[in-house]
Image (cartoon, rainbow, N blue to C red):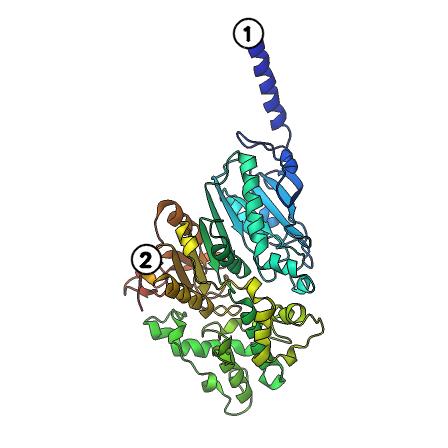
Amino acid sequence: MRIVRALRLVTLYAGFIALASTPHSIVADGATSCESLSTLVLPNTTITSSQAVAAGGFMPPASPGRAGGPGGGGQAFAELPAFCRVAAILKPSSDSDIRVEVWLPAAGWNGKFEAVGNGGFAGSISYPAMAQALRRGYATSSTDTGHSGGGANFAMGHPEKLIDFGYRSVHEMTVAAKAIVGAFYASGPQQSYFNGCSTGGRQALQEAQRFPSDFNGIIAGAAPHIQPRLLSGVVWVGQAALKDPRSSIPRTKYPAIHKAVLASCDALDGLKDGLIDDPTRCHFDPKVLQCRGNDGSECLTAAQVETARKIMAPESRTGSEVFLGLERGGELGWGGLTGGPEPNGDGIGQFKYIVFENPNWDWRTFNAKTDVARAENAYGGLINANDPNLKPFAFHGGKLITYHGWADTTIPSHASIAYYERVLDTMGGVSKTQDWYRLFMVPGMGHCGGGEGPNSFDMLTALEQWVEKGRAPAQIAASHSTAGNVDRTRPLCPYPQVARYTGTGSIDDAANFVCRMP
């Protein structure tokens, strides 16, 4: 017996030595090896590769039209820990070709899963967001949503691919990813989270509305929850600014407009700090900048004044809003909508490839009276995430955080407020929603980041505390940096609360602010 036991120990020890000397083999405690995941059988799923990646050894593949892949090549991934990288193709329909990746920490798994979202019309794996999740100890996944490349051309003549992009791909990815996590670690995730902004925010809301049991906690940033209408709006405002060259506002004039807006509204909150905490109180009229003589960089022509007014105000046709209007304070970012020579590319793509299915469609022919409805009818039912009935998600115990930059010039910030208020109306008011849903508006922040306000924050930790410990976020710390150095911190407050200065101490220190009703 002693000899047999000794031989077993020698064999086991030899196995560990072999494993340690093989850089391309990862085995999670009590489960299977990374490589053997390639034989895992899942519905509608083909695992195309399963390989161990050494610490610092990941290099993202090149994305279509973007050499070196997202995230600036491999430099952003140099500090990643070792992980098991699984790639798969999902085919829930005959025309589906959904590429997904699942990353599994080789050691130090926190027992949780975080799926991450996309931007624009997707078309690639979100490697930077996956890397961030992996560094935090999460098993993580991302999908290209069923096509390659960032435009809308994939959808023309492919209704199943449009369904995949609209909502199906993220759910199918989530189901497959959880199964892969369970196979690798011999147990599924204790908690599951979704984190996305822009298209990722819409994906997040789709999950809460259509698949309420997929995630315990969801973060939805700057969500285009009514995408056909929002993209119609960017075509409308682009057409208004660019169809007639006289109406176009040169980028060189944006700083003068922004300066005038701040001069008019910065101090409305009682503090002159270069930020407009609540732009809904700002009623700046660009008419004050109209040139009194010759045109110049510090003034606007009469035609440019009208363009600025259209950018800042909602536009309605046949009883429904075509363009929600941009809040005052984001003028430095107007170039994405009206910087020309054409309107926003996603908006044009919507009409070329989904609405009219005509690659030669001319944005100059856009008709707000008819084309917004056409966009809604073409694919609104597949793409919109506008259902305010979140009872199944709340009943499941899910927690939802949404956020939006007040200076967003891609998705009008009022879109998130409108959806939040619809949910309140449907679910019975603040008292019946604040335990599981909160909205945070971010002064001075652009689309999913950037801008002059505190734009760096950790929503995921706040969500973890809420889901896992029952601590609802009363405020979330945010910071702004210049040249890598933090120069301002502020609390983000649950809407409609705003951060107010206590009257003492530095205005750049969050400790001197409190959240309260305006």
Question: Which quarter of the rendering shows the N terminus?
Answer: top right
State whether residue 71 is above or below residue 429.
Answer: above
Q: Amino acid at mark 2?
A: Ala
Say which residue appears at 42% left-offset and 56% top-offset.
Answer: 401
From the viewer's perspective, is 20 left or right of 465? right
Q: Can residue 79 be seen from the camera position used here?
A: no
| Image coords of residue 361 (percent x, y) | 69, 75
| Image coords of residue 163 (percent x, y) | 61, 59
Q: Secondary structure at mark 2?
A: helix
**Residue toward you, 264 or 131:** 131
Q: Badge 1, how many Cα within 10 Å: few under 14, some, many 20+?
A: few
Question: Which quarter of the rendering shows the C terminus?
Answer: bottom left
Q: Badge 2, how many Cα within 10 Å: few under 14, some, many 20+?
A: some
From the viewer's perspective, is 106 left or right of 405? right
Say which residue appears at 61% left-offset and 20% top-offset.
Answer: 14
Q: Secondary structure at mark 1?
A: loop
Label 1: which residue? 1
Q: Amino acid at mark 1?
A: Met
Say which residue appears at 57% left-offset and 81% top-offset.
Answer: 369
Label 2: which residue? 511
Give the number of the disc on residue 499.
Answer: none
